[in-house]
């Protein structure tokens, strides 16, 4: 009985507040470290912009190819599935109440503003972000970063900066590709299964989408790309002593990227659209 009471006392309000405080401090420390990494990369970008241009350019192109080009297959499949589901289901419901002209507005709100950015971000995190964290983690554990420093090469300039720039450029292109495939493929399936012609479907979409929606999409892509690349490279750099640390930091990077991107998406959508 006394042991039971001792266990329940550990769940006192003071203990819970202490856990909450420690967790909050840890999150703030993590965000400050990531922002410090971003500041350092911006400084290197302008200071060393003429150093190793060919190597940096090749590394950026390789990262764009890995993150963007090699992801087109899975991105296209996901976009087709969501485009088909959203358009066919929405068209079926709107037709019953004579609201087909609102299909374009619904597509812009659901696919362009929300599903497109979130699903593209999810694919990039799971496919490229985690791989980047593993790569950086192994480079730290195997002392490759230290070897670069001994050769007078800044790893942030040669390794981290090209990956950050490559991920940002790739995710912007993937955003556009996802939206194009989702809308085009969804309309195609709608035409096949419902017989509704493109001449009826497309005008409502063109009337609904605005340049502001496109700009907000690029803003989300920029920030999501920054979050994914910075968090994954930062977490990968925390693996120092053993190879067994690499899976731990990789899983932590994926979870943090998901949380940060989803929260930021809610904040951006709430601020600009509500």
Image: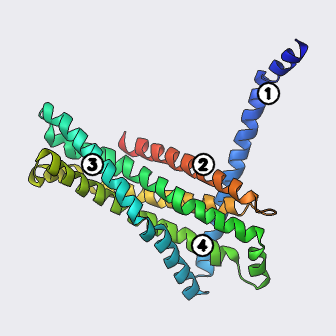
Task: Describe the element under mark 3 as helix, strand or loop.
Answer: helix
Quote the CA–CA distance across marks 4 and 3: 38 Å
| Residue depth check, mark 1 versus mark 3: number of the one nearer the observer | 3
Compared across the picture, whether 237 is left or right of 168 comes to: right
In the figure, is residue 73 to the left or right of 202? Answer: right
Q: How many marks can you see?
A: 4
- Give me the C-alpha separation between circle 3 and circle 2: 29 Å
Which SS class for mark 4? helix
Quadrant of the drawing holding the C terminus: top left
Lower sequence index among marks 1 and 4: 1
Label 1 with label 2: CB-CB less than 8 Å: no
Location of residue 261 in the rendering, given as x and y in whole percent from the top left corner: 52, 50
Residue 172: x and y in percent read 41, 64
Query: Is 123 on the left-hand or right-hand side of 259?
Result: left
In front: 92, or 159? 92
SS category of the residue bearing label 1: helix
Residue at mark 4: 161
Q: Which residue is mark 3?
A: 84
The residue that disc 2 covers is: 255
Up the image or down, 224 lies above or below 71; here it is: above
Q: In this orientation, which residue lies closer to the viewer: 69 or 205? A: 69
- Nearest to viewer (mark 2 / mark 4): 2
Q: Which residue is mark 1?
A: 15
Q: Give the residue furthest to the front.
A: 193
């Amino acid at each position: 009985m006394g042991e039971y009471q001792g266990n329940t006392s550990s769940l006192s309000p003071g203990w819970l507040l202490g856990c909450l405080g420690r967790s909050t401090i840890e999150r703030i420390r993590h965000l400050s470290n990531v922002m410090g990494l971003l500041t350092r990369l911006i400084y290197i970008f302008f200071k060393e912009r003429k150093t190793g241009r060919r190597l940096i350019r090749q590394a950026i192109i390789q990262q764009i190819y890995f993150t963007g080009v090699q992801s087109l297959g899975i991105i296209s499949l996901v976009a087709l599935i969501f485009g088909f589901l959203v358009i066919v289901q929405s068209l079926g419901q709107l037709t019953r109440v004579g609201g087909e002209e609102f299909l374009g507005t619904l597509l812009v709100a659901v696919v362009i503003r929300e599903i497109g950015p979130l699903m593209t971000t999810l694919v990039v995190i799971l496919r490229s972000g985690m791989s980047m964290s593993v790569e950086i983690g192994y480079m730290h554990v195997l002392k490759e970063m230290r070897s670069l420093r001994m050769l007078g090469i800044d790893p942030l300039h040669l390794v981290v900066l090209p990956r950050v720039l490559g991920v940002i450029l790739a995710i912007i292109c993937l955003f556009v590709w996802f939206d194009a495939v989702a809308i085009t493929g969804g309309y195609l399936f709608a035409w096949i299964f419902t017989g509704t012609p493109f001449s009826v479907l497309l005008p409502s979409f063109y009337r609904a989408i605005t340049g502001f929606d496109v700009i907000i999409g690029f803003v989300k892509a920029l920030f999501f790309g920054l979050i994914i690349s910075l968090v994954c490279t930062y977490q990968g750099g925390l693996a120092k002593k053993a190879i067994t640390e690499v899976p731990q930091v990789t899983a932590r990077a994926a979870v943090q990227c998901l949380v940060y991107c989803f929260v930021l998406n809610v904040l951006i959508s709430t601020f600009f659209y509500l």
